[in-house]
Image (cartoon, coloured by chain):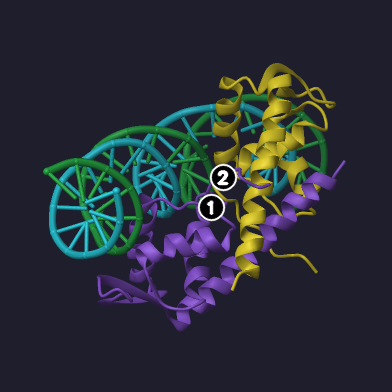
Chain colours: A yellow, B purple, C green, D cyan
Amino acid sequence: MTDAKADLLQGTLDMLILKALSLGPLHGYGIIQRIRRMSDEMMQVEQGALYPALYRIEQRKWVKSKWGHNETGRRAKFYTLTKTGEKQLKEEEASWDRLALVVAKMREAT
Amino acid sequence: MTDAKADLLQGTLDMLILKALSLGPLHGYGIIQRIRRMSDEMMQVEQGALYPALYRIEQRKWVKSKWGHNETGRRAKFYTLTKTGEKQLKEEEASWDRLALVVAKMREAT
DNA sequence: AATGATGCCTTGCCATCTTAGGCATCATTC
DNA sequence: GAATGATGCCTAAGATGGCAAGGCATCATT
């Protein structure tokens, strides 16, 4: 069925990260896996996109980070969604909905 | 009702232009208006985005252009969708659908 | 005469995604 | 014991493409 990979559109990655973190704190590497799972393996985020994005959104206070250890004891940096981040996520989803609506209307239009 | 303007995500403009031209040849300025109309006034494309995009997609042979005159006699450059452009439009729509599916799945995911 | 709409264009800025690396630890396999 | 692959962090260079802000010309309306 859906084995086609979806491309990332510039600007959507933040939303995906925030959405993934809305399920609970997680470290960077895990975020990639969680996004893949949540998207039914359709979306594969590259590390080269993820880590700069994490840095970016932490600067904007949408997440905060803390070094810790995963369940097997390995060192990892855990990211947590902030209140501001939750609000941002809602805004990005609303913004996505508006664009999706535009695309839908364009398709109907004659 | 929907007076909120939708932001453009990088990579979607080409699709909107091709879609607008799928209704028939038109000049640049008119494409902006047609997109606005087709989107129920939700999408306002800037000239600074449009003209470079038109140049770009003409290089890629998705459209071809010819100088002509509009209905009031004014000089204007008319763009026509090519066969390749039609195919490209289909691909971009499919690509959009995949991403929309990813976003939908992400929202359902737990 | 001035303004606003129509019509074309360019330039510089900036955000961000991709590709391609580097490095360390740990478990598994040969 | 050595090699490999997964896990985990990061960076740099390059390309893409939208945005703001300009410039210019014509034409109709005020």
Gap between marks 2 and 1 measured at Cα: 6 Å
User: How many numbered discs?
Assistant: 2
Residue at 54% x, 32% y: name it. Answer: A52
| Direction from residue A9 to residue A40 in the image, left or right | right
Report helix, strand or loop for mark 1.
Answer: loop
Report helix, strand or loop for mark 2.
Answer: loop
Q: Quadrant of residue C1?
A: top left
Q: Quadrant of the N terminus of chain A?
A: bottom right
Is the C-beta separation of discs 2 and 1 under 8 Å? yes
**Within 10 angstroms of label 2, few (less than 14), some, or many (20 or more) residues?**
some
Give me the chain letter of mark 1: B
Q: Quadrant of the C terminus of chain A?
A: bottom right
**Within 10 angstroms of label 1, few (less than 14), some, or many (20 or more) residues?**
many
Residue at 80% x, 51% y: name it. Answer: B105
Residue at 63% x, 68% y: name it. Answer: A107
Above or below — where is D2 with respect to D11?
Answer: below
Which label is found at residue B43?
1
Q: Amino acid at mark 2?
A: Lys
| Direction from residue B33 to residue D27 in the image, left or right | left
Residue at the disc numbered 2: B5
Q: Could you tell me residue B18's position as x and y percent? A: 49, 69
Q: Amino acid at mark 1?
A: Met
Q: Earlier in the sequence, mark 2 or mark 1?
A: 2
Q: Quadrant of residue A7?
A: bottom right
Q: Quadrant of residue C24?
A: top right
B108 or C9, which lies in front?
C9
| Direction from residue A47 to residue C29 in the image, left or right | right
Say if labels 2 and 1 share a chain. Answer: yes
Q: Could you tell me residue B30's position as x and y percent? A: 40, 65
Above or below — where is A82 with respect to B70?
Answer: above
Above or below — where is C30 with respect to B89?
Answer: above
